[in-house]
Image: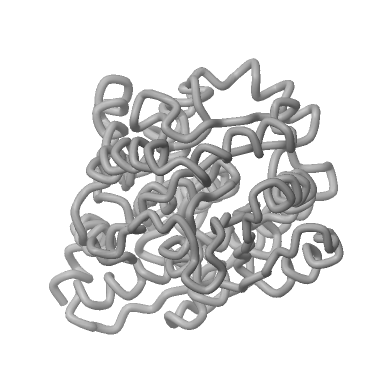
């Protein structure tokens, strides 16, 4: 049973399913759970497309009730099908609760002979806030698969009984090592700097990030003739974005094709999410932003203990990507921070050198293969049959 709740998790889960099939010699393994289109295409029998329900920040009461109902439906599916292993892919706020409920269900009534192994693929950011969650993971899960290099040591110091394996970052497999942005000053067709806008993949991110991105793009277009492209993962998000764009700064909206867009961009303006690591991988100088609702931000200020939200900055130990959060994420500040990356070759070169150091920390190819091998080591009956 495998569950993912966001587009990035859907892709990661689909890659893991393929790796599990290969690692088991293409023996008959049945996959059930919840996720999105990529998981369905990989052959997972989905109870629900959970990627349609992802939220950012603190969920409303109605959203909480909806997630509880989805969780209960998945627990019922697990009780009915008694899978050998449950794999939560990222989305830990939901998957952590689901894992605990599955473990409880397996210990009750006629299910006492059902002992599923519980796996979390991608650690929640317990090292950034609420470190006590690590103890809860250790009490529930049999295996934690990490994609960041410092996490295994972090857990070893706090929860030594929890098995943690660093498998490397999946983007290393998705992109060829040679495919690094050569720092184009301009597009051959436009002779102008190219700015890539990456507002996020969730509706809350779109609503809060797109207006400030559009105004930043307008300023840069007016002053420096910058051409702008926004990459989105789905038509449903694009249909929301298009009415927000206006006409003063023509912005091309593109569905998918992020890798090629990164290769062709001079710089990027991105939300502080997984995509910042892709910007780092392709060597694209990037300015980051994050805006959320007032309550989430107020609570976050009190519980987040790391100095940065962008993962490249955390890995580098410094602001290799200028970062603007909440009220500081203004069009004036964002456009000013982008100007050196768009107009100064020396500034771009310095940024690329710093991003190369981040890239070198992401591990070697084979993340999904290593993750599959670790999971199958919990299930020798499947691995050897």
Given residues 222 and 30, the one toward you in this image is: 222
Work out whether residue 68 can be spotted. no
Image point (48%, 74%), residue name: 39
Image point (70%, 46%), residue name: 223
- On screen, residue 385 versus residue 171, left or right, reads left
Residue 153 position within the rendered picture, expressed as x and y whole percent measured from the top left: 24, 28
Given residues 46 and 224, the one toward you in this image is: 224
What number of labels is visible? 0
Work out whether residue 282 can be spotted. yes
Residue sticking out furthest to the left: 384
Where on the picture, by quarter, is residue 356?
A: top left
Image point (32%, 44%), residue name: 146
Residue 158 position within the rendered picture, expressed as x and y whole percent measured from the top left: 32, 21
The coloring applied to the image is one colour
Given residues 277 and 128, the one toward you in this image is: 277
Residue 314 position within the rendered picture, expressed as x and y whole percent measured from the top left: 40, 29
Where on the picture, by quarter, is residue 367?
A: bottom left
Image point (60%, 45%), residue name: 271
Q: Image quadrant for the C terminus?
A: bottom left
Residue 106, compared with residue 124, is above or below; it is below
Residue 106 position within the rendered picture, expressed as x and y whole percent measured from the top left: 46, 53
Q: Image quadrant for the N terminus?
A: bottom left
Where on the picture, by quarter, is residue 26?
A: bottom left
- On screen, residue 54 versus residue 138, left or right, reads right
Residue 30, compared with residue 87, is above or below; it is below
């Amino acid at each position: 049973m495998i569950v993912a709740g966001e587009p990035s998790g859907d892709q990661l889960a689909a890659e893991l399913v393929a790796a599990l099939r290969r690692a088991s010699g293409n023996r008959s393994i049945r996959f059930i759970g919840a996720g999105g289109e990529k998981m369905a295409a990989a052959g997972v029998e989905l109870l629900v497309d959970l990627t349609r329900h992802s939220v950012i920040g603190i969920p409303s009461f109605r959203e909480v009730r909806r997630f509880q109902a989805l969780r209960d439906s998945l627990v019922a599916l697990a009780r009915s099908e008694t899978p050998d292993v449950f794999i939560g892919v990222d989305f830990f706020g939901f998957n952590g609760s689901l894992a605990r409920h599955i473990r409880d269900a397996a210990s009750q009534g006629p299910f006492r002979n059902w002992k599923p192994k519980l796996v979390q693929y991608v650690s929640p950011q317990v090292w950034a806030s609420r470190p006590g969650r690590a103890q809860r993971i250790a009490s529930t899960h049999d295996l934690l698969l990490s994609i960041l290099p410092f996490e295994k040591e972090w857990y070893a110091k706090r929860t030594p009984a929890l098995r943690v394996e660093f498998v490397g970052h999946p983007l290393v497999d998705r992109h060829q090592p040679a495919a690094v942005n050569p720092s184009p000053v301009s597009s051959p067709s436009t002779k102008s700097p190219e700015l890539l806008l990456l507002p996020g993949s969730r509706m809350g991110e779109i609503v809060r990030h797109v207006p400030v991105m559009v105004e930043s793009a307008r300023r840069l277009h007016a002053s420096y003739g910058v051409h702008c492209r926004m990459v989105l993962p789905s038509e449903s998000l694009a249909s929301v974005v298009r009415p927000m764009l206006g006409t003063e700064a023509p912005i091309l909206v593109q569905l998918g094709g992020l890798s090629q867009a990164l290769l062709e961009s001079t710089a990027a303006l991105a939300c502080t999410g997984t995509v910042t690591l892709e910007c780092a991988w392709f060597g694209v100088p990037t300015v980051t932003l994050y805006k959320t609702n007032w309550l989430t931000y107020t609570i976050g200020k009190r519980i987040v203990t790391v100095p940065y939200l962008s993962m490249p900055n955390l890995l580098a130990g410094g602001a290799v990507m200028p970062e603007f959060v909440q009220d500081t994420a203004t069009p004036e500040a964002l456009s000013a921070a982008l100007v050196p990356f768009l107009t100064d070759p020396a500034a771009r070169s310095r940024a690329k050198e710093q991003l190369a150091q981040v890239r070198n920390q992401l591990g070697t190819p084979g993340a999904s293969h290593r993750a599959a091998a670790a999971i199958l080591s919990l299930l020798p009956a499947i691995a050897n049959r």
